[in-house]
Image (tube, coloured by chain):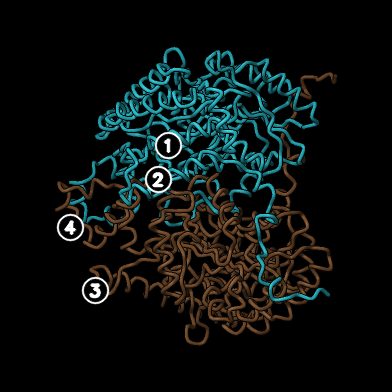
Chain colours: A cyan, B brown
Amino acid sequence: MRLKTESSLNSKIITYDNINPLIKKVEYAVRGELAIQAERIKEQLKKEENLGFDAVVNCNIGNPQQLTQRPITFFRQVSSLTEYPELLSPENRSQVEKLFPPDAIEHAQTLLKQIGSVGAYSHSQGIYYIRKNVSKFIEERDGYPSDPNNIFLTQGASSGVQNVLHLIISHPNVGIMIPIPQYPLYSATISLFDANAVHYYLNEENNWALDIDQLNSSLAEGRAKGYEVRALVIINPGNPTGQCLTEQNMREIIEFCHKERIVLLADEVYQANIYQPKEYPFHSFKKVLRSMDSKYDQFELFSFHSISKGMVGECGRRGGYYECTGIDQKVIDQLYKISSVSLCPNVQGQIMVDLMVNPPKPGDPSYELYQKEMDEIYKSLIRRSRKLCDVFNSMENMECNDAQGSMYLFPRIHLPEKAIEAALKDGKQPDEFYCLAMLNATGICVVPGSGFGQKENSWHLRSTFLPPEELFDVICSRLEKFHKEFLKKYR
Amino acid sequence: MRLKTESSLNSKIITYDNINPLIKKVEYAVRGELAIQAERIKEQLKKEENLGFDAVVNCNIGNPQQLTQRPITFFRQVSSLTEYPELLSPENRSQVEKLFPPDAIEHAQTLLKQIGSVGAYSHSQGIYYIRKNVSKFIEERDGYPSDPNNIFLTQGASSGVQNVLHLIISHPNVGIMIPIPQYPLYSATISLFDANAVHYYLNEENNWALDIDQLNSSLAEGRAKGYEVRALVIINPGNPTGQCLTEQNMREIIEFCHKERIVLLADEVYQANIYQPKEYPFHSFKKVLRSMDSKYDQFELFSFHSISKGMVGECGRRGGYYECTGIDQKVIDQLYKISSVSLCPNVQGQIMVDLMVNPPKPGDPSYELYQKEMDEIYKSLIRRSRKLCDVFNSMENMECNDAQGSMYLFPRIHLPEKAIEAALKDGKQPDEFYCLAMLNATGICVVPGSGFGQKENSWHLRSTFLPPEELFDVICSRLEKFHKEFLKKYR
């Protein structure tokens, strides 16, 4: 038996050195060093330190309501009523009718009748009534049937993606194909569940298009490393890259998966953020799949959607869903079991999914306001995306593709040699170095391209275009001033 | 190159046989076969089939509001106002003041000032203002300092437990000590993250007490199997067993962990469900630890709490928190990173945590109603727990310990040989067989003891005592009738 001294008993049992190594390996740049420095600056500003600017502008994360985007009135009216059902009682009715339109009252009553209380656990897969509405939404969007038994409501798309990847990753030699650049949820989840990311590169020169040749060579590389490549992740519209896939391209992707026996994960959370709808409309993979030859009838697809994006922008609520297409029932049963360990997705998130897929219809009392609010946000997003894109393109050593969709621009920066040297000396990636300098000089927080992956020796940043429109000119001129000075310093 | 025929291309890629084996291994009885059969019966009742009863009574899960427990009025007033901040605008003020008390309006305004919008992502660890209120609550409860930087807000206690276990489980030979019987979240999470449950048995003969000898022999057994035993889970008050630990016992547990270099996970989600407060009060492990000798200053403890239980019962909202005591900052940083991959706990869940820890105070306009509602639920829970316990104890071949705490009774059933034979013939655990027969005969859904673990050849069931008090007599007499007939049939 070892003799234990008091000092050995007092050293920590759990230390950085002995925790789960998979967790240590995870990288998550969207909330990483830059975000932490931004918090520090906010504290300094609270203490009224003079930093040359008066607020941090968080362009590092797609969080519209943090940047004062107003929620959709009807949605919040309904959720407010479901929180406090006393408002629906006969004695309060006359007061409440002065504050809430009749269709909000009716929608809340319908939901409460189905749900009972928003404080009760629901079915682990989500409330059946809401899943039926999701299926109707999908049927109307695509023109093909959808079954509520194949829908899982989730706490944001992220938890759905994590459950599906956890299920598919059956041993440490599994490969999952992900785009580069990619949203780091994917690389983080793949690390966490001990699989291997197999990268395919999007083509920046062709507006971040997805070339099938790239899929083929990436798959060949993954297989050469001995990986069993089981799934392909497509983010459409792209994050951080903003491109929208063409129908033709999507057919090729489905053919590729079919031929190579790979399951498709379609991250379609930005499906409502489409800024050039004539040239680059959104097509769901489900629709494209169902429009193809019957030999694809058994094709296996998971499609993800969320209340966090679009014009809804209700990120803090954590709501979303995924649809299983062609997935074996026994596999769905296992997904259900995993969901049941977390008991259920939060009910207010589920209610917002219902509202997103089942909003006011023409003729309803709230329709006009709903439509006006959606339109205003939408048109403003288009204007802001173009303005910021133009500013990036007007800068020396910077080039930026249009946002066809999503909430982000991903400009490329050609950094001077001296800046790269200074960064490496500082132990930082060159684009991280640039973004930190930007944050410290302007209060504008973006994410370095290295957090998403990029071709070697190319440097980028991801910025949302979500700050309020009235601040846009100030933000853009601050960016321009910083960029000039940065180039001057390191030229 | 393999030649692929169309039929091989059309077989499923993901099947039960090739998914993650850890997921397949997970068992989760609370939402298992019984719960699924209960759903089937509900569908039959909707079709007005005559089953001899008119509703399913879900005693299988601690879901108070599903069983018509009313939410706390003040809490819902505040959450309703935060959903629709327009209600707080000057033009609506006079209407709103007729519907909401001034302290609810003020609380909502304070929260919104801190949060911005409930639709925005918050800090991944939870809103700092709310974490400060959690720390104050802990300080007032225990009389010892608490630091908001060591608090993580979570989506229910479950997600906190999962993150902490995921972190601690660093290799497949890790052992985690859990009670038998236990809440299956623990066994499920341990399976999922590929560690090993090391069982210690609670002493049914002594009101489910925890004997330190049991911990020692269980640890020795775990180590003999080659496990690195890293953590001990204590559920206090017990689930499913309802016991409350004495302070003396808790000190011994802390000494045991200290000596054996094991981290303590204290599941204290039932801390407000204390039914014999004089004889069996609740003590938090944090308080007991801090009252001990300074040699325990570095002791490592995670303590979990939730909005789902107590008199709050807001399960569907998914809110909770955990406090890290004595945990290394670098380890906390890794927990933060893991939380950030899921972005943030849902904000309405966080708001309910705030309300739970920061309710109306004496003198506030809402205090009296708040106190009355809490008291009524509390007293009714005591009455219902005693009534159901008495009924179980009055039944032949059944014995049941008092509920000192939590929401459950866990009676032991001495099943006749013939029933055990019939069960095994049917491929079922004997207690599962009994519970299924009960469900089919009465509509009352409970969970078999085998879902929680029990001593070999002893059989139990777990039942909540949450059905509405006015239904209690009917439920009890249905139970008695079923039990008599079951015994008669299999005697």
Q: Is residue B449 visible?
A: no
Nearest to the observer: residue A168 or residue A152 = A168
User: In the image, what residue type sits under mark 1?
Assistant: Leu
Mark 2 vs mark 3: give the one in front. 2
The image quadrant of residue A405 is: top left
| Label 3 vs 4, first from the N-terminus | 4
Secondary structure beneath label 2: helix
Q: Chain of mark 3?
A: B
Q: Are marks 4 and 2 on the same chain?
A: no
Residue linked to disc 4: B98
Q: Residue at x 55, y 14 (%)?
A: A205
Mark 4 vs mark 2: give the one in front. 2
Number of residues whose C-alpha sits closer than 10 Å to that of mark 3, classed few (under 14), some (14–19) or many (20 or more): few
Residue linked to disc 3: B363
Give me the disc on residue A439.
1
**Label pair 2/1, CB-CB below 8 angstroms:** yes
User: In the image, what residue type sits under mark 3?
Assistant: Gly
Mark 3 vs mark 1: give the one in front. 1
Q: Quadrant of the N terminus of chain B?
A: top right
Q: Chain of mark 2?
A: A
Q: Chain of mark 1?
A: A
Residue linked to disc 2: A41
Number of residues whose C-alpha sits closer than 10 Å to that of mark 2, classed few (under 14), some (14–19) or many (20 or more): some
Nearest to the observer: residue B461 or residue B347 = B347
Residue B201 image offset from top left, x and y in percent: 71, 74
User: In the image, what residue type sits under mark 4?
Assistant: Lys
